Amino acid sequence: MSGLLRGYGRGLTLAFFAAAALWGLMLIILPQLTMLERAMTAPKRALDSSVAQMLVRDARTCISVLDTLTPAAPAPSGGLAIPSLSGPASPAPGLALPSLGGEGQAAKRPYILQCDRTTTHVSLVRSAGEPRAWLDETYGLPLRSVSDTGPIDDQKAAAEEIGALAQTLYGELKTREANANPYTLENFATLASARLIPQSDAQRAEENARLSNKLLALIGLRYEAGGQTYERIGLVTLTRTLVQAVIATALALLLCYPIAYKVALATPPQRAVWLFLGLVIPYAIVELMRIYAWTTIIDNAGLLNGLLQGLGLIAEPIQFKRFPGTVFLVIVYTYVLFMVFPIYNVMNTLDRNQIEAARDLGAAPWRVHWRIIIPHSKPGIAVGTIATFMLAAGAFSVPRIISRGLQAEWFSQTIYNKFFESPNANAGAAYSFAYTLVCFALVALFMWLMRTRLKDFARVQ
């Protein structure tokens, strides 16, 4: 702090810290607080008031559709009945309009989804493990439904009664929910909830024999109860993604350490420039284009299969999209610069005389690396490893594009599906926030194991 004040003065130093605080507030703290609030709030569709509101909407739609029904010839056997929206009309071939007879008519009207759902005996959303609950039984409503065989006027009257009951209940529930505590941990609990895996006895025996499933059973992510197999799918996906991210980071480190050493310590400066150009030039292309370029290499009709078939080594294309190793390879290729540059920056500050002295004293090459180069490069290795791990753990485009859905999804894809495919943004927020905490915990553990402190990262610059 005193160095900043001496070098830049009080005004620039305060401006720097103000900008850093604003950046952290707007891009880190506030988004995470918003995510946490959403994660601890039950989704609206899970509230009892939302169920009552949906019943009101179904009742109104049912009445609206029933109003459009007009007399017509009865539908032939096996035909489908549709309402007329603009007065009497001749039925289309194979379709017929319902007949609206007199008071005693018992002809079945056409199927109307909203009328079928207009009943007070509608299921409420409850957590896994809780007994099933119904709207009428929970809140003391009379059992009412819309019959599909009674006169249209009676059906409309039933729908109006149900809509009125649901509207009154909706107002009461909204008031009750507004005064209740809105926060819950239920969204986080879904991450650890177990799901039934339907399997035959033969399939169960085959799956239980797999090493991966044995490991999942060992750590409690897969178990059997009552002759059925259950799996904590959310935690399984989370664990698998973290393991894959660690493997991809280790591969990047094994690849980048020799490159950084070669460029920083074992190559004249003039040749090092050309080596770096060879690394940087491919990354002048945007990341998405580099990933799509890999699809032209690994596709069934891609360059790699074409070459192998041209050489007569294979008869059928190899399904590289199904190999997890392909995803690792592309992730390492995509994020390799985030590993190599921090290591190079620190290695480049090492006095080469130390290496020469160690060699003169008879130290083997591996011992030179272990006792001199690696300890000196530890901050760069830590920064590169952390950056690559976080990028790999949060990778979405690489596994999505490379695997084409033919491999188990990564946790980032699960979060995306919760937000945009389900949609269940509240559970997605819980998954995202929990994932952030887990990744931060792993980074802190790694820094502790490496005996690396935050101020050591300044050496990387």
Image (cartoon, rainbow, N blue to C red):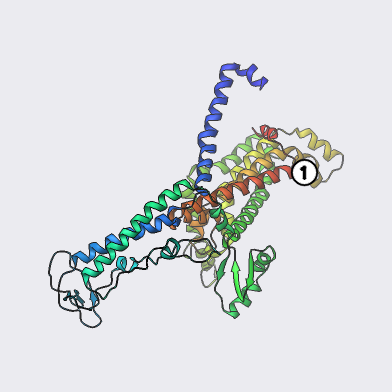
Quadrant showing the N terminus: top right
Q: Assess disc 1: are there few (<14), some (14-19) or many (≥20) residues with their C-alpha within 10 Å of its C-alpha.
A: some
Is the residue 224 above or below the residue 330 in the image? below
Q: Quadrant location of residue 72?
A: bottom left
Question: What x and y, as percent, mark residue 56?
Answer: 32, 58
Question: 390 or 434, which lies in front?
Answer: 434
Is the residue 350 above or below the residue 57 in the image? above
Question: 272 or 177, which lies in front?
Answer: 177
Quadrant showing the C terminus: top right
Question: What x and y, as percent, mark residue 303?
Answer: 50, 60
**Residue at horizontal 47 percent and vertical 45 percent from the top:** 286
**Residue at horizontal 56 percent and vertical 47 percent from the top:** 433
In the visual, does 367 lie left or right of 306?
right
Which amino acid is tagged 1?
His
Residue 292 in sight in this render: no
In the visual, does 395 lie left or right of 60?
right
Q: Secondary structure at mark 1?
A: helix
Q: Quadrant location of residue 60?
A: bottom left
Tag 1 residue: 369
Question: What x and y, as percent, mark residue 293?
Answer: 48, 53
Residue 33 in sight in this render: yes
